[in-house]
Amino acid sequence: MNPYQKLLSNTVLFGISTFGSRFLNFLLTPFYTRVLSRTEYGVTDLLIQTGNLIIPIASVGIANAVIRYGLEETADKKGVFTTGVMVTLSGFFLLLLASPLLGRLEFLSGGFLGLVLLYVLAANLHSVCNQFARTMGHVRLFAADGILRAVLAIGFNVVFLAVFSMGVSGYMLANVLADGISAVFVFVRARQWNDLKLSSVKRREAVRMLRYSAPLVPSNLCSWIINISDRYLIALLIGNAATGVYAVSNKIPTVLFLVAGTFSSAWQLSALTDQPRAEKERFFSNVYAVYSAVAFVAASAVILTARISTCLLAAPDYYEAWRYVPVLTLAAAFGCLGSFLTSIYMVEQRSGATLMTTALGAAVNVAGNCILIPIWGPMGAAVSTLISYLLMFGVRAVHTRTMLRIRWEPGRFVPCTACLAVQCVLVERAVPLWPVWSGLCLLAVGVLNRKPLRRALGKAV
């Protein structure tokens, strides 16, 4: 099997897990927006995102090191897994000690703090078990686990929200149970108790793992700032109801990140293979050409269908969310392109570069939010997100050329970006015959990207 076929095969399997499970959850948006008020939906979003903020801090991002070093042929697998579990448990203990400080946050009152802490623990344990299973070649188990977690989350949410009307608490508890049960499932099916040996933990290897993962923690925090800080500012300056609407508008561009996440899971296994530099540059360039083509075409399609998708996926009270979808989709497209470049940093073990570029984007995002939200409201937050992702991508594109030279094909890249920008204006402004003009933009993007997509089919078959 050539490397392109292997990448495609792994992408399909991971797609069953990552994309399939998250897409099922994505389709539940109409259910959530009908059983939860706009204020409740805004609160649940803040709680989940707060948990997502704490997750990498409490675990020191150790799951990143588990996948990075677990894939090394010479690595001590038991040492990698045991270090991951021990760091996760130690981090949770420290988090418990800091919980009185977290309890002072107003939206964590009313019993929500305990649920957020359990959400963090379950998510971190699930991540370590899940990633280690992937390094051991349990690709089918990885896929099955993703579907199981989705089914559990959906089932518990339906029971807790529709049957018992538990509201925000029910939503949080459903996610805790889904992650916890999924972690146990992977641990048992992969017989990971055989790899959990305290005697296998070596100080030198543990330090190496932490040295790699630690810079990714502030990097994750900066990513969180880019993706989530706007919601806190909207809640502060406008209100929780507006936060709920903006959260719905983010759900639709998330489709791009779901596709990118599916690919990234498979790409990590291919990117770390040993190759001569010239061959690696050719491999990365070919894969990037296809990756960017899919990102551009998908973004154009999402922008074209922004109104109808919002209407189908959310209750009528949330319909105004469509206005922010085009700009957020363009931002997501560049976010996906920027995330591809982090694979170069991963291969070169330059996690510090990931941190610096993400921190730059976060700083610009916060400044943009503070300036633009008071002027344009939620649209200001969307524009700020777009600017930050554009900047991150640009800086990484220049910096990574000192490590690995990827072919950028400006004759395709620039016209595609221009088409997407024009399409955003056409849809948001609702100019006369905008569906026709927007459809022509999608057609133009498809034509511009026909060659890399055709080459991809040729290499994969």
Image (cartoon, rainbow, N blue to C red):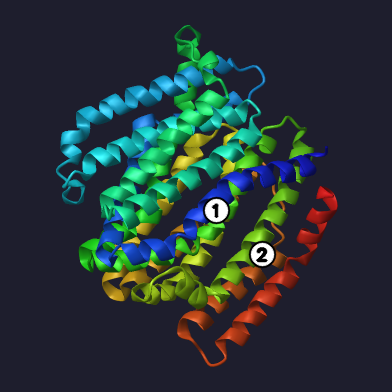
Q: Nearer the viewer, residue 350 or 122?
A: 122
Q: Residue at x 72, y 60 (%)?
A: 409
- For mark 2, what is the residue? 413
Residue tagged by mark 1? 258
Outermost residue toward the bottom? 432
* On screen, residue 36 above or below 177: below
Q: Nearer the viewer, residue 93 or 293?
A: 93
User: Tag 1: Cα neighbours inside 10 Å, few (<14), some, or many (≥20)?
Assistant: many
Left or right placement of residue 14 versus residue 84 in this view = right
In this rendering, the label closer to the viewer, 1 or 2 = 1
In which quarter of the view is residue 214 placed?
A: top left
Q: CB under 8 Å between callouts 1 and 2? A: no
Label disc, if present, on residue 446 of the rendered structure? none
For badge 1, the amino acid type reads Leu
Q: Tell me what residue is drawn at x 36 percent, y 45 percent.
A: 174
Task: Say left or right for 190 vs 379.
Answer: right
